[in-house]
Amino acid sequence: MTDFPGNPPNANTPPRRPGSIRRTTTHDSNRPDGLDGPVVHVAKGRDLLTIDIGQVRVLDQTQIEATIDYARVAIIAIASLPADPALPALAGKGAYSGFRRSVEEVLPGEMASHRVRAQLLDDFPLAVMGNGRALRAEGKRIGIARRGALPVDQCAGWADGGTLLKGFSELGPPIRIGPRCLALADSSDPASWHAFAPLAPHGTRRARRLDIWQEGGLGQGDCFFRDSHMDRSGIETVIHEWRLRIAFDPATRCFVSAEAEAGPLPYPECPSSGNSASRLVGAPIDGLRRAVGQDFVGPSTCTHLNDTFRALEDVGALFDRLAAVA
């Protein structure tokens, strides 16, 4: 099917603002040895300070590379640049369920650091799981989708009686082909995104952009999220896409506004979950990852939008870094 709910894909990345920090991250999952081989996962991220047009400074930059046995959802090997001798201890751990808990055991305090690597690790399990799209697109069963009871009413997409559950089969969720992806990077601005390689056929990508700046006495944020899939013929299409605009009070470190705009989404029930963004208003930035996991559940929410909410826990630390160099 080609009729995706939601709005058309977002146009090009907006220009960088003077006096802003831009965090960009990508998670690329490829299968160089074929659909039955391991998943090679490369996650990259960068925090870029734009002092003025043409004057930038890289504040943080990280790359994580992992090889995953997708059938067992287990990490075969993992390493990072810059290197960390503790990270390879995640080898042998689950790449999906329990992964975030394993990170806290191996790298205590990692998520509290608010660094790029912490965000990459937070997105890791869902980005890895998302490569099941490559199997489903080729008529293969997504084994991970059949483990345990189906998550009925977990989110809008899994709503009881909804399109996904009605079309669920032994292969997994019903597949709907989204519109072609627009380019992430701004062709007129080489610094608009960090460098990343093209996806190979049967590859999947999770991409994020978060811009933070100050305006009108408030912290401002513009957040973009996309999951995409490269098919066998080299055509990349959107699976999920959201854009979120937020404002927050730097003194109280609470959100004062939040509005989500749905891009292409797979099922008719999905776009209405954007209304859940209003529940951020008045909520504290600090501790947001835990709060989202506890409170943003049920068919009025979206697990992919929730992951974007989780990423907002870092806006306070990014704003502090921006203020320190202003």
Image: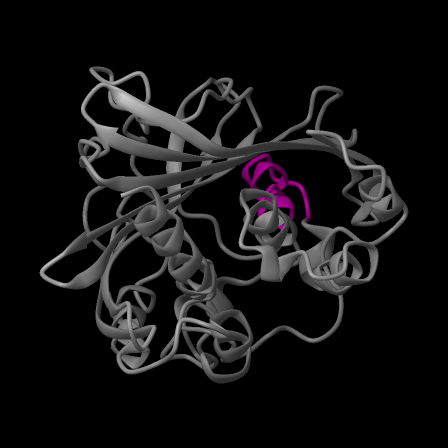
Q: Quadrant of the C terminus?
A: top left
Instruction: From this view, report whether residue 51 is shown above or below residue 143.
Output: above
Which colour scheme appears in the figure?
one colour
Q: Is residue 131 magenta?
A: yes
Q: Which residues are magenta?
A: 127-141
Does 59 sit above or below residue 115? above
Residue 12 image offset from top left, x and y in percent? 21, 30
Q: What residue appears at the point 72 percent right and 23 percent down from the top-left corner? A: 34
Task: Please report the residue visible at 29 percent of the width from the left and 37 percent of the height from the top.
Answer: 179
Q: Residue at x 78, y 37 (%)?
A: 84
Q: Position of residue 77 (x, y in %)?
A: 84, 35
* Residue 162 visible in rendering: yes
Nearest the viewer among 249 and 169 is: 249
Majority SS type along the magenta span: helix
**In this view of the protein, which residue sits in the foreground, 15 or 75?**
15
Seen at 34% across and 39% down, the residue is: 22
Q: Is residue 37 left or right of residue 133?
A: right
Outermost residue toward the left in this view? 216
Q: Is residue 96 above or below residue 1?
A: below
Q: How many marks?
A: 0
Residue 177 can be seen, yes or no: no
Q: Position of residue 39 (x, y in %)?
A: 72, 33
State the image quarter where residue 91 is shown.
top right
